[in-house]
Image: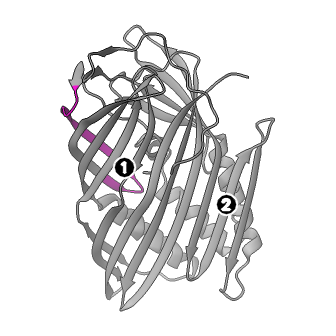
Amino acid sequence: MFQTLTLCAVLSVPAAAPTVGADKVELAWRLPEGAVYRVETSAETISTTTAMETEQSETMEQRRTNHVRVVEVDGRGNMRLSMTTQSLFMRKESSMMTIRMSATRDEDGKPDVDATVTTEVPGFETASFESFFEAVGANLLDLEYAIHLSPDGSVIKSSVDGDPFASLPADDLATSIAKQAIELMISPDELAETAVAEMFVKLPAGFVEVAGDWPVQHDMNSVGVAMSGTGRTRLDELRDEGGAQVAVLKRDLRYKVDTDGLEEKMEELMALSYAQAGIDLDFGVDLSCEPLDSASTVEWDVAGGFCRSIRWEEMRLPMTGTIRVGPQAVDMDMHVEIANSRASWSRVEPR
């Protein structure tokens, strides 16, 4: 779930636009074979956790640019896509530490990654942690995603080629725990699912009129959190922009959130962390989460057959629960706010 960025690519518009009348239109993904699209996403997240009357806050800013290449289009219009990451940026800040990581490809396509870590924790070895996050960034640039997309925007299948955990250094206790945490919390299958989760808009079958709507179902899993969303999308308006017809869609979904998988991962992660210090304890995590409401506005290029932009309204995810370490149990409240979440598409013209 991801700003308005300036796009320098030229949009390609087919000669024939599949429209009927002024207030009725057919919407479909029509990405031509061989075309390349730039997809830019961004989001800001603020997490506030309260436990034992102590409040801790963490902010994260993320930006990513992907290239999506249309490998093949079959007779039914189903598209096979290949997606690679061209650049990414992450800044994570808490009271203990600030981590900044940027990764880009140079003119030859080789990764250029830089990470900086600042902290007030005495004796913390920042150099090894910086090397760790540089390795993470390089791995993410090396991944290639395969996506099978239908004309109505359903992701038939997605997968990832590459190892997100390759050659991660574990030179000291901090990086060793970080390596184990990443391998535990992130699965390659979920990585592929998360990467494409909000890129593709679900569209109706056939023609739709202005003010017409259709049902939407969206399910995804990330770091053990299973989200099942249902709602509707409405064709809010049709407008002309320089001769190109743009459909404005309004989407509203409510997600049920299941945290069972996250609880298991957190228990295992705590056991690993304490084991590093030679402490053997039992752990328990019991979480519950309120439903997540998601509202967004989509600008759709009707003739081009792709999504120009998605802009999400601010989202809030409240979570409560208990964490048990040995015989001691601690109540916890966590609130996550996701703001400035955007995605934009533009076609990249060959040089």
Q: Earlier along the polypeptide chain: callout 1 or callout 2?
A: 2
The residue segment tinted magenta is 209-226
**Type of residue at label 1?**
Asn
Per the image, is 212 magenta? yes
Q: Which residue is mark 1?
A: 221
| Residue 163 screen position, x and y as percent | 61, 44
- Residue positioned 69% across, 62% down in the render: 132
Q: Which residue is mark 2?
A: 101
**Eyeballing the image, is 221 above or below 337?**
above
Picture quarter containing residue 326?
bottom left
Horizontally, residue 143 falls left or right of residue 199, namely right
Q: Determine the secondary structure under disc 2.
A: strand
- Residue positioned 39% across, 32% down in the render: 300
Picture quarter containing residue 83?
top right
Q: Say which mark, if any, is on residue 158.
A: none
**Eyeballing the image, is 12 above or below 136?**
above
Per the image, is 266 magenta? no
- Residue positioned 45% across, 54% down in the render: 341
| Residue 328 screen position, x and y as percent | 33, 89
* In the foreground, 178 or 237: 237
**Type of residue at label 2?**
Met
